[in-house]
Amino acid sequence: MPEQSPNWREALSSVALWLMVYVGASFASLFVLVATGQSAADAVPMWALAMNVGAMWAVYLLVMPRLMPFQEGRLRDSFGSWFTRRDLVVGVPLGVGSQLILMNLVNWPLSKLFPDQFSPEQISQRAEEIADTAPGWWALVLVAVVVVGAPIVEEIVYRGCLQTRLSAILGTAAGVAVTSAIFALVHLTPVEIPGLFVFAVVLGVARHRTGSLGLPIITHMAFNAVGLSLVMFI
């Protein structure tokens, strides 16, 4: 039996649906900044940043799994079943290697072709700016946001909801590729897009091969932990 042709119209509808949620989450985030008086600030303090991303995550987690379900039952009921010992054993070195090796493999040729745009200073600038907002004990809040919260929420939204939906419509390869491109683009930092796209493919393959979100979440956590350590301690 021939394979079903990809339905790009349905895929675009799914992307549009995600975009609506993304816009709604962004408005929730903006509302928090305005309500806390930080909308015009050049550098948002850590307490406001935590509230900001918390509002965005709340919209994502409340809406996305309902619009694009990737499992049966409630999200909180199946969260613990995602993680196995294998996820820790494989995910930590995979995330560390992706940050220390894969990112350099992607960015090194770009830094030679475009030295001004892809210098190490440009690539790490946004991470350093975020780290600067968390002096003293606020660094613990930053770790909670970057190393714990962001990987969990982003994997549920992108690899869980969006990739599952697009892979069912377009096939696995196209579903992973389109989701990875969207994931890289929404970070809104051009210099980070090539590296984040390749890393997102790693996460997408991990999701596909295991059928779970445990491995991509652990991999993403290790990746972010190493990246944050590089700008905070080196």
Image: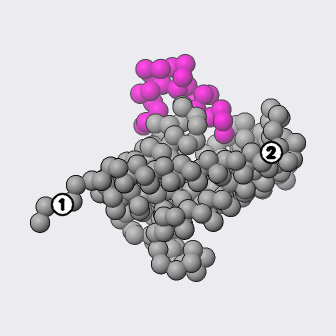
In this orientation, which residue lies closer to the viewer: 40 or 207? 40
Q: Amino acid at mark 2?
A: Leu
> Magenta stretch?
104-127
Q: Is residue 192 above or below residue 121?
A: below
Q: Quadrant of the C terminus?
A: top right
Which residue position is annotated with label 1?
3
Which residue position is annotated with label 2?
33
Q: Earlier in the sequence, mark 2 or mark 1?
A: 1
In this orientation, which residue lies closer to the viewer: 41 or 110? 41
Q: Is residue 44 above or below residue 80?
A: above
Q: Position of residue 143 (x, y in %)?
A: 71, 54
Q: Is residue 120 part of the magenta span, yes or no?
A: yes
Instruction: Confirm whether residue 223 shows in the render.
Output: no
Q: Position of residue 20 (x, y in %)?
A: 56, 50
The residue drawn where x is 27% and y is 53% is 6
Q: Amino acid at mark 1?
A: Glu
Q: Position of residue 12 (x, y in %)?
A: 40, 48
Q: Is residue 78 above or below residue 37?
A: below
Q: Quadrant of the N terminus?
A: bottom left
Left or right of residue 3: residue 113: right
Q: Which mark is residue 26?
A: none
Left or right of residue 198: residue 40: right
The residue drawn where x is 48% and y is 39% is 195
